[in-house]
Every structure is written in C-alpha cells, then in structure tokens.
Image (spheres, rainbow, N blue to C red):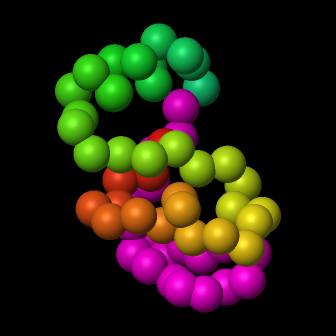
Amino acid sequence: MKKKIANWGNYPVIESDEKAFSFTEDIQDYARQHEHFITRGNGRCYGDASLALPPYLL
C-alpha cells in the first residue's frame, strides 16, 4: 500500500510502498523475490535510514 511516511522528526516525508507481514515465512519469501527494500520499525527515531530510495519498506 502506498502511503506518506516520516520518522519521528517528521522530516523528510516520502511516499513509499509499505508492506506488513504477520509471519516470518512471508518476509523471507518477499526478500527472495525483491532486490530493493529496507526494514522499518515503528518510525520512532530521528534518523532517516528507513526512508531510503527506492522506497520499498517492510
């Protein structure tokens, strides 16, 4: 699902395809099929590491 995201400091704001998974196996399958992605926790940090481009977030 595409949505606008930011970290705790609310800057920068980017539009990203964000995916959520309930099972470890689903994450593993996704990782095998996609080359570009970065994991993201709950966004409660001041860094922007989880806002990398191309924006595919897990």
Residue at 34% over, 27% down:
31
What is the x, y in percent for residue 24? Answer: 55, 16
Total tally of numbered discs in the picture: 0
Q: Is residue 2 visible?
A: no
Q: Is residue 51 visible?
A: yes
Question: Within the image, what quadrant is residue 34 found in?
Answer: top left
What is the x, y in percent for residue 9? Answer: 73, 83
- The answer to which of 49 and 33 lies nearer the viewer is 49
Question: Within the image, what quadrant is residue 46 found in?
Answer: bottom right
**Residue 10 magenta-highlighted:** yes
Furthest-top residue in view? Answer: 25
Q: Which residues are magenta?
A: 1-21
Q: Please determine whether, in this image, residue 11 is positioned above or below residue 43.
A: below
- The answer to which of 57 and 47 lies nearer the viewer is 47
**Residue 20 magenta-highlighted:** yes
Q: Please determine whether, in this image, residue 38 is positioned above or below residue 8.
A: above
Residue at 67% over, 48% down:
41
Q: Please determine whether, in this image, residue 27 is positioned above or below residue 11.
A: above
Horizontal relation, residue 55 to residue 41: left or right: left
Question: Within the image, what quadrant is residue 48 found in?
Answer: bottom right
Quadrant in the picture for the N terminus = bottom left
What is the x, y in percent for residue 22? Answer: 59, 26
Horizontal relation, residue 49 to residue 1: left or right: right
Residue at 27% over, 21% down:
32
